[in-house]
């Protein structure tokens, strides 16, 4: 037991970075967090980084395992690191001549912008503030720093209401007859510190702590505590639901304690944030903002609207030049676009942070292609660099130029995140979430967003803020999620309580909009427009085509699409689909001129009457198939025979039943009777799929006849049609044996009737969506030319979850880590995946060249595509707009699994 205790003590918890030593370089990001590792890296390559130390993510994990107690020995290591920091800087914690002050920040292995706590100016107390004023010869600056600490410490560490501090500040501003914080004189800030301490004591029930080490310990605990704050949990859940499996497996956050440098020491000081390339467009041009005489949180919080870094040279030419040189150094070192924070203290530039910059998919594609051109990365690295799911951003709608030119433009803000959003106004995050879940498209309107708003930001189709810049919280989060955002639209005045906004135009006219009104946001131009402006599909760039070309070069999986019409087929082919993996024939029956015949067939009492109704449906089916085969000429098209239960084609409301009775010239009672007869307690497991064809073989015969006639018609027109007939929901080999024979007989009969002498190579296979079919895949394969895994139903049947009803419990399951992600969005590899793998192995044990694919929506999920590549599938099939995602994900799987 004693040995174990000594071993536990030997685990290093604190890593120092500075001129004296840099301990973190080369350690894993999972241990030091992204921020901690990069501070060590920047220090090691000679960049001007204020020294400090990092407490590991493992300590955060231990903190929670021990019931929110700091591990034994941690504060001893912290003391030691503080002493090293004091020696390096020649300053002392709590000193009355030249005090050491630090910032305390979070830093997980995966970036979570603004979701966790930060405390600045830590180490100040009643004595040290006088020492800071003496050392800097700037009394105003010292007391401004102290009031910020008391406020931030009260808010972050003690959870005190922020408005109490605001009220105290308002009284001071009123006393000194000023409106701006920066105009309050030194004596006013000295008074404010006393007022803040009084607020702190009243709300916390104790004095503001004067011991800097106690301040530091409680601040460390507060940062660890923020790991499980509601906003942080929500952010991780939303990211995990989008397929970010890395974030779901983190054990906690690191804590970074770093010597303070000040951007608020006067007009020769400032602070800023920026990206080494434009995160919206990917242009190789520094994209950032700065504030003069401010601290870093002022920029990120969006409280003041900053200036672009492009104008920084007018204010401080030397600092701007050095920043541009650092941009090159960082990109050369990391070979990646960086997101940085910097401070200028009395003309001296300091780097506070660098991390891989969040960008939208449009920028990711351009940056990857440009960096190949610049010789920074290889083609393979470029393919691996772009998150496959982010390609969605390249496929975002934009406004039709004619519609936008004619639009009623209300005002313009900053183009913070591209895309087009049209929706009604929502004024709070809970309201946006609630209305979204009710099926409404909403735009979240806030003065500035905060981390508490993430649920609403995720639910909204667009975000509009009246303050803040292009690097504010709203912009950074929206950009990472591919969400349209216009920030800093200062002409928009928001009244959250009254649920309305007023917009003042260039002529001074004021217009009011409420929660019932629709507006349109153009995140590319920053325009805010009244009403609904018409959108259009995207035009893909040359860089996009280049990346897709590289992806196609390295992938081995074929990519097909799920499409039921010629229009969808053409769109998918334009996106690079190499065939159709799922054509759902039931979708063809719902149009007005067809549904009447379908319903006649369902109501028919005899086979002869059913065949008569089906004969009327035949021309429609044939025409649809011919159009799809033409759009997919030269590519395989897998047609699934009728799958849903027949009652889905009948109306259930009395009024609709009456209308149907009139159309079919029957009594409403007949329709009601037939609808009742077809009613099933559990339709998903009922009379559907291949069971329909066993009971009503005439349906199968009509559909197969239509497919064959369409293929013959195409052949005569020299169109290379490659139909594949898929029999759904097979659970036994006997079902497939019987139905294969019927399909073959119908093909033969149709070819003879049409006197066609050419060659039709029509494959006959099955959709594997029942666990039993996976378990007996060797038996099923005897009668199949191909398998296609229908993973939507296979997931339902394996988990016993109804896909239509999981909304009531699945979010809780994800939050409690019962399941890591929604299994209907990303394939459950250990359970459902095991069945898929078994089906592949058993199927190919019977037929080594059995063609196997997947046609559930999992076919467009990058993690699922990676699994399909690993288990040896021939293709994946997904919706048209996810085809590029699947192409890139397949290439990434091929490269990473080598």
Image (tube, helix red, strand yellow):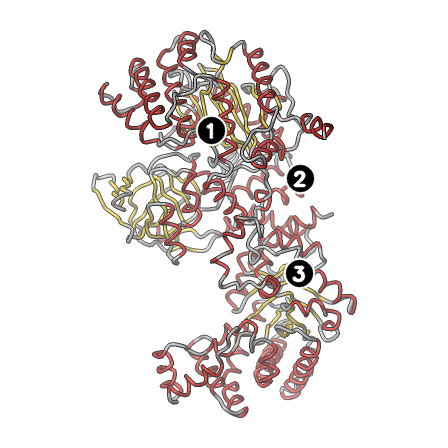
In the rendered view, tell whether residue 861 sits above or below residue 7: below
The total of numbered circles placed on residues is 3
Tag 3: Cα neighbours inside 10 Å, few (<14), some, or many (≥20)?
Answer: many
- Who comes first in sequence, dot 2 or dot 3? 2
Residue 875: which disc? 3
Residue 488: quadrant of the picture: top left
- Who comes first in sequence, dot 2 or dot 1? 1
Give the structural element (helix, strand or loop) at label 1: strand
In the rendered view, tell whether residue 139 sits above or below residue 674: above
In the picture, measured across the screen, residue 562 lies left or right of residue 135, that is right
Q: CA distance from mark 2 to mark 1?
A: 38 Å
Give the farthest residue toward the front. Answer: 1
Residue 118: which disc? 1
Task: Name the residue carrying label 2.
Answer: 378
Residue at 62% of width from left, 83% of height from top?
A: 694
In the rendered view, tell whether residue 800 sits above or below residue 650: above
Residue 411 image position (x, y, % from top left): 30, 42
- Who comes first in sequence, dot 3 or dot 1? 1
Give the structural element (helix, strand or loop) at label 2: loop
């Amino acid at each position: 037991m004693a040995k174990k205790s000594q071993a536990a003590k030997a685990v290093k918890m604190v890593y120092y970075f500075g001129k004296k030593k840099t301990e973190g370089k080369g350690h894993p990001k999972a241990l030091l967090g992204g921020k901690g590792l990069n501070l060590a890296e920047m220090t090691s390559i000679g960049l001007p980084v204020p020294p400090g130390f990092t407490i590991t993510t493992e300590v955060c994990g231990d903190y929670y395992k021990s019931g929110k107690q700091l591990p034994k020995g941690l504060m001893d290591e912290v003391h030691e690191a503080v002493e090293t920091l004091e020696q390096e800087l020649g300053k002392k914690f709590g000193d009355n001549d030249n005090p050491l002050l630090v910032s305390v920040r979070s830093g997980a292995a995966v970036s979570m912008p603004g979701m966790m706590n930060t405390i600045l100016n830590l180490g100040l107390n009643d004595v040290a503030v006088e020492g800071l004023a003496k050392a800097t010869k700037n009394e105003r600056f010292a007391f401004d720093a102290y009031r910020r600490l008391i406020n931030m410490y009260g808010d972050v560490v003690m959870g005190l209401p922020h408005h109490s501090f605001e009220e105290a500040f308002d009284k001071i501003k009123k006393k000194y007859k000023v409106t701006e914080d920066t105009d309050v004189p030194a004596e006013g800030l000295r008074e404010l510190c006393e007022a803040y301490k009084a607020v702190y004591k009243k709300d916390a029930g104790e004095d503001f702590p004067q011991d800097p080490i106690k301040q530091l310990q409680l601040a460390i605990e507060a940062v660890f505590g923020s790991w499980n704050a509601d906003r942080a949990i929500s952010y991780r859940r939303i990211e995990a639901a989008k397929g970010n499996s890395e974030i779901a497996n983190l054990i906690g956050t690191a804590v970074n304690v770093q010597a303070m440098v000040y951007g608020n020491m006067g007009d020769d000081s400032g602070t800023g944030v920026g990206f080494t390339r434009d995160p919206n467009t990917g242009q190789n041009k520094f994209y950032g903002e700065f504030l003069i005489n401010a601290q870093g949180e002022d920029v990120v919080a969006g409280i003041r609207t900053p200036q672009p870094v492009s104008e920084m040279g007018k204010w401080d030419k030397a600092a701007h030049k050095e920043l541009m040189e650092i941009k090159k150094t960082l990109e050369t070192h990391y070979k990646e676009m960086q997101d940085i924070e910097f401070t200028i203290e009395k003309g001296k530039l300091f780097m506070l942070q660098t991390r891989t910059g969040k960008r939208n998919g449009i920028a990711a594609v351009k940056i990857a292609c440009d960096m190949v051109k610049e010789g920074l990365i290889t083609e393979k690295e470029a393919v691996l660099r772009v998150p496959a799911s982010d390609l969605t951003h390249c496929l975002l709608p934009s406004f039709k130029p004619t519609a936008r030119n004619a639009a009623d433009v209300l005002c313009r803000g900053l183009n913070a995140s591209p895309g087009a959003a049209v929706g009604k106004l929502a004024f709070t995050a809970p309201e946006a979430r609630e209305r979204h879940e009710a099926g409404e498209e909403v735009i979240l309107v806030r003065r500035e967003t905060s981390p508490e708003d993430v649920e609403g930001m995720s639910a909204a189709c667009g975000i509009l803020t009246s303050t803040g810049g292009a690097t504010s919280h709203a912009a950074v989060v929206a950009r990472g999620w591919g969400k349209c955002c216009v920030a800093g639209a200062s002409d928009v005045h928001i009244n959250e309580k009254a649920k309305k906004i007023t917009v003042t135009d260039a002529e001074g006219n004021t217009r009011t909009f409420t929660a019932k009104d629709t507006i349109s946001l153009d995140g590319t131009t920053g325009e805010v427009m009244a009403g609904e402006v018409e959108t259009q599909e995207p035009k893909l760039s040359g860089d996009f085509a280049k990346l897709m070309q590289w992806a196609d070069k390295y992938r081995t999986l074929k990519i097909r699409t799920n499409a039921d019409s010629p229009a969808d087929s053409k769109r998918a082919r334009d996106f690079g689909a190499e065939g159709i993996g799922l054509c759902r024939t039931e979708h063809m029956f719902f149009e007005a001129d067809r549904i009447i015949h379908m319903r006649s067939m369902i109501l028919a009492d005899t086979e002869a009457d059913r065949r008569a109704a089906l004969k009327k449906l035949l021309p429609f089916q044939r025409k649809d198939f011919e159009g799809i085969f033409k759009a997919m000429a030269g590519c395989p098209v897998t047609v699934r025979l009728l799958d849903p239960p027949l009652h889905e084609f009948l109306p259930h409301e009395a009024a609709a039943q009456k209308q149907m009775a009139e159309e079919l010239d029957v009594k409403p009672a007949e329709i009601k009777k037939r609808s009742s007869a077809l009613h099933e307690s559990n339709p998903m497991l009922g009379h559907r799929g291949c069971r329909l064809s066993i009971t009503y073989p005439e349906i199968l015969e009509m559909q197969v006849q239509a497919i064959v006639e369409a293929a013959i018609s195409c052949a005569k027109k020299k169109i290379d049609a490659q139909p594949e007939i898929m029999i759904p929901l097979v659970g036994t080999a006997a079902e497939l044996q019987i139905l294969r024979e019927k399909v073959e007989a119908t093909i033969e009969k149709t070819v003879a009737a049409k006197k066609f002498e050419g060659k039709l190579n029509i494959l006959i296979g099955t959709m594997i969506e029942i666990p039993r079919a996976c378990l007996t895949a060797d038996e099923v394969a005897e009668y199949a030319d191909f398998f296609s895994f229908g993973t939507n139903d296979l997931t339902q049947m394996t988990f016993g979850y109804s896909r239509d009803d999981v909304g009531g419990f699945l979010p809780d399951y994800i939050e409690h880590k019962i399941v890591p992600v929604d299994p209907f969005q990303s394939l459950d590899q250990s359970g459902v995946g095991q069945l898929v793998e078994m089906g592949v192995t058993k199927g190919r044990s019977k037929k080594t060249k059995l063609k196997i694919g997947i046609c559930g929506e999992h076919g467009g999920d990058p993690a699922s595509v990676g699994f399909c590549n690993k288990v040896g599938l021939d293709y994946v099939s997904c919706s048209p707009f996810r085809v590029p995602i699947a192409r890139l994900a397949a290439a990434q799987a091929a490269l990473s699994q080598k």
